[in-house]
Image: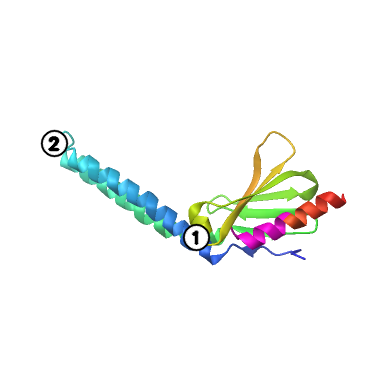
Amino acid sequence: MFTSTEFNPLEKKYYRLMLIRRALFSLVLIVAFCVFFLTNRDKEVSGVVFLGIGLGVLLIVIGNLLLAKVFFKRKMYSLHDTNLAYKKGWLVSHLTVVPFSRIQHIEIDEGPLERFFNLATLSIYTAGDSGKDLKISGLTKEKSQEIKELITAYIKDE
């Protein structure tokens, strides 16, 4: 059984996936800056402003890649007998606890990059109009399926 009183970290492969996603975002940002540079041949934007924008882009790219590890380490989940808890956050910490008795629907989602790393996202919907109440990315597909089956069995027994 998965019951635990401690929080479990996400799969280490998820950190690599986070880095790839952030690198792709950074690449798009750099390409946009290069397009801006190439279209500024008429000097519509002064060199000082252009340099400031370039430094801003560079800081965003470096900060985005460096903070990936911090964000990854702060994401954890815990499975108990009657609920699932998920915590995340760096400056502001968020703890979401979903009782099994309130769960209406569970989905396991996989994107192309997640499939490549054998990862999945567990999305849990509860009663009410709030939509997705809990979304845990970075679990293996097998772990996601096991959690889904455990919750489904609990709901059927209730």
The number of discs equals 2
What type is the residue that disc 2 sits on? Answer: Lys
Kindly identify which residue carries mark 1.
116
Q: Which mark is residue 43?
A: 2
Q: Are marks 2 and 1 in contact (CB under 8 Å)?
A: no
The local crowd at label 2, few if under 14, some if 14 to 19, many if 20 or more residues have their Cα within 10 Å, is few
Q: Residue at x 16, y 33 (%)?
A: 44
Residue in the foreground of this view, choosing between 97 and 32: 32
Residue 35 in percent (x, y) is at: 23, 42
Q: Is residue 115 found left or right of 54 in the rendered image?
A: right
Mark 2 or mark 1: name the one nearer the start of the chain.
2
The answer to whether one can see residue 137 in this image is no
Residue drawn at the location 41% of the way across and 59% of the way down: 66
- 150 horizontally vs 19: left or right: right
In the image, which is nearer the foreground, mark 2 or mark 1? Answer: 1
The figure's colour scheme reads: rainbow
Check disc 1 and report its element: helix, strand or loop: helix
Count residues near mark 1 (Cα–Cα under 10 Å), then give few for <14, some for 14-19, many for 20+: few
| Direction from residue 39 to residue 20 in the image, left or right | right
- Quadrant of the rendered structure where residue 9 is? bottom right
Task: Please tell me whether residue 8 is drawn above or below residue 86 in the rendered image.
Answer: below
142 magenta-colored? yes
Coordinates of residue 151 in the picture (x, y in percent)? 76, 53
Give the amino acid type for the residue marked by disc 1 in the picture. Phe
Residue 69, label in figure: none
**What secondary structure prevails in the magenta region?**
helix
What residue sits 73% from the left and 35% below the top?
A: 128
Q: Which residues are magenta?
A: 138-148
